[in-house]
Each structure stands twice: as C-alpha cells, then as structure tokens.
Amino acid sequence: MTAEGYAPPTTLARAQAPSAPVAAFIGATLGACLWLWRGHIQRSLLRLTRRHPSLKRLPSDEEARRESDEDVQDVDVLCRLGLEAIKVSRHLQRAARIPCAEIQDMGTGQVGGHRTLDGKTVMRTMSPHFVLKPMQAGTRGIKEVRFYEEIEALREAGSLGMLHAMESFLCEYYGVLLRPMSSDTASVHKAGHYIVLKDITHGLRHPCILDLKMGTRTYEPDASDVKKRKEMDKYPAQEITGFRFVGMRVYNALTKGFTFYDKSYGCSMPPDSVSQGFVNFFSNGNGLRVGVVRAVHAKVEALIQCFQKQTRYHFISSSLLIVYEGADTPTPNVDVRMIDFAHIRCGEMLDSGYIYGLLRLRDTLAQILEEHSTSADHH
C-alpha cells in the first residue's frame, strides 16, 4: 500500500525520465555552463596574479614535474567548494601559486582564536606577508569563504553600494590554501584548508594587537539552548558592554618586551573596568598613547557610519582587530579590521547588536581621551 500522492522510487524515476529532445537540450546547456565557468576561472586567475606580483599562474603538469625534479618548494593555493552545502551566487574558486613560501606558526602574533592541545597556535604566517587562518569544518568555513567571495564579486561588478566604505575594514583576501605541506618532516604544519589573508602587522616593528569579540550576543538565532547558554556564560556582561576582550598583547618601551592578556582576562573583566582595559592596551610604559587612541576613535566612528547604512549582513561572533605600532612614531600607525565571519548571516535590518558594541567602544575611547586631555600626546 502506498500513501496518496506518493509514488515508489522506480515509478517516480520512470515518470520523470526526460525525453530525448529534453535530454539533448539539458546536455547542451550544461556544456555551455561549463565553458562559461572555465572562462570565469581563467579571468579570476588573471585578476589574482595581477593583484600581487608574488603570485603566478598554476603550472601545467609538465612544469610541475620539472619544478619537482629541481626540488623547488612551492605551495598550491586552491579552493574548490561545491554549491550543495550552501547557496551562493557563484562558484567559490581561487587558484594561484606562491613560490618558495615559508610557512610557520604564528606564535605570539595570535592573541585570540583556538589553539591546539599542546598549546600551539592554529594560525600560520606565510612569507612574504600572508596570514593563514584554518577554515572551519562544515558550513561555518563555507560561510566565511562565501562572505569574502561575495565581497570580491560585488567589488568586481561595481555593486558594493553601501558596503564600499566597509571594504577598507576587511583584510585583503587571496583565496584558500589547500593542504600546505613542507619538505621538512619535523614540520608542525598540518594538512587542511586555510583562508589566505594579508597580514596587517607586516612592517610593524612592535605590533600591539587587541581582539574584541563584537556584538551583544555571540550565538546565532537558531542555536540550541545549550549553545546559547554556553556562549552567554563566557561573559554575561557582554549584553551590557557590547563586546569583550578576547586577547591582546602590548609593547612596553621601557622593558623592550610584550605583555600578554588571554581570554580569561576579558571574561573576568567587570563592565566598569572596560575603560581601564583599553588604557592598559594603549599604554607603553611611557604613558598613554593619546595619538593612537584618537586615531582608533576616528576609525571606529567611520565604521559606525558604515553599519548605520548597510543591512545586507549581520555579523555574529565576529571580532574587531585593533593594531598599532608599539614604538613611538611621528604619526600614529594604526589599523582596525573586521575578522571572523563563520557565523555571518544575511539580514534585512540594521545589525543592532554590532552597532551597539561599536557605539559603546566609541564612547569608551572618547571618555579616555577626555580624561587624558592634558596628557602628553605620545604617538
């Protein structure tokens, strides 16, 4: 017996079998799509190699064998993610080749994020100035790559619109590194997929780094009750502060060394101590870097203007990375970037949780500037 409206699989297959003309049409259409897709990949490769002089085209099999015989160490950058896992407007495809690339553990340069069981950082750096971020498993990693790819597609099409100003707050994206391997058998490099981004600390002698987890909540709306409770328990005051300190490192000009703060520092921070947390970050032993605070305040204000206009994305459990040169400089050397998009969601309204965090951040920095208005302006 079968339920009404349901056909057995064999019957359904026979009923849906296309006729010969339809099958021919489908075949021709697929062929045309594959031809167009191949052209799109070639254009993407050309754009990518033009964007960075150290990148070159993916070699042919014959070239690869010849280079292998010459014992030249190379790293293939390749991302091939199917369309089944998540609906996207175009195929996620980036390919390039970086010759003689040196990959190493990021070490103390990673102030937030996950670490391995033996304490090693999961982030990598690759010469000359790339950061390799492990691509998370499942749809989380695909979401993050999709976000970078969508921004690329919108930019190339001239359709960024309200997102144009926000683009300057994103790390430059180069693609996905597939299974980086080293000829050194003792290497700790692990096979897998890594998102390749520009290292914004490149060129800084003493980079000071602060990772802020932004927003009033760090869980997605459809998360389980267990997941929601787990996230809220990390820092219950985040609904009040709008962000939390994930980690930071600060250069001390007197000791010529760094002070490190891990996630326990932020998770145990009372809301009324947030201002002091920023004072600790912006001080270098000689006093508060007022010029640096002022420059960061200006960038946060600009980012607020972006968020008050864009409704395309909601950034959940995303971080804001604040970086500055620890050594005194004639003018402040500051950068502010948005990172971590594994939980990004599309939306139709303003991202109120993230905006609230930005407003609280701006006001806190303004308060610090007011309280130290008579201090020497150390850059």
Image: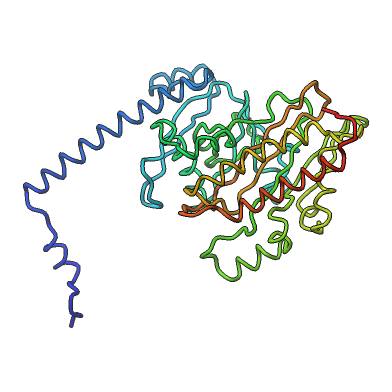
* Quarter assignment of residue 253: top right
Foreground residue among 327 and 13: 327
Q: Is residue 180 visible?
A: no
Snapshot colouring: rainbow
For the N terminus, give its image quadrant: bottom left
Question: Where in the figure is residue 213, as x and y percent of width and height?
Answer: 67, 50
Query: Nearest the camera: 216 or 165?
Result: 165
Name the residue located 74 percent from the left edge and 50 percent from the top edge.
245
> How many numbered callouts?
0
Give whichever of 378, 375 is nearer the camera.
375
Question: Residue drawn 24% across and 37% down?
Answer: 33
- Of the 4 image quadrants, the one containing the C terminus is top right
Q: Nearer the viewer, residue 268 or 311?
A: 311
Which residue shows up at 59% across the image and 24% down it? Answer: 101
Residue 207 in the figure: left or right of residue 175: right
Residue under the image location 38 percent in, 50 percent down: 87
- The reply to whether residue 149 is visible in this rendering is yes
Q: Position of residue 62 (x, y in %)?
A: 38, 20
Q: Position of residue 162 (x, y in %)?
A: 48, 40
Question: Does residue 262 appear left or right of residue 4 in this picture?
Answer: right
Q: Is residue 102 left or right of 45 when viewed as pictured?
A: right
36 up-or-down from 242: above or below: above
Given the current orientation, which residue lies at the most extreme bottom position?
1
Expressed as whole percent of the image width and height from the top left, the position of residue 88 reads 38, 46
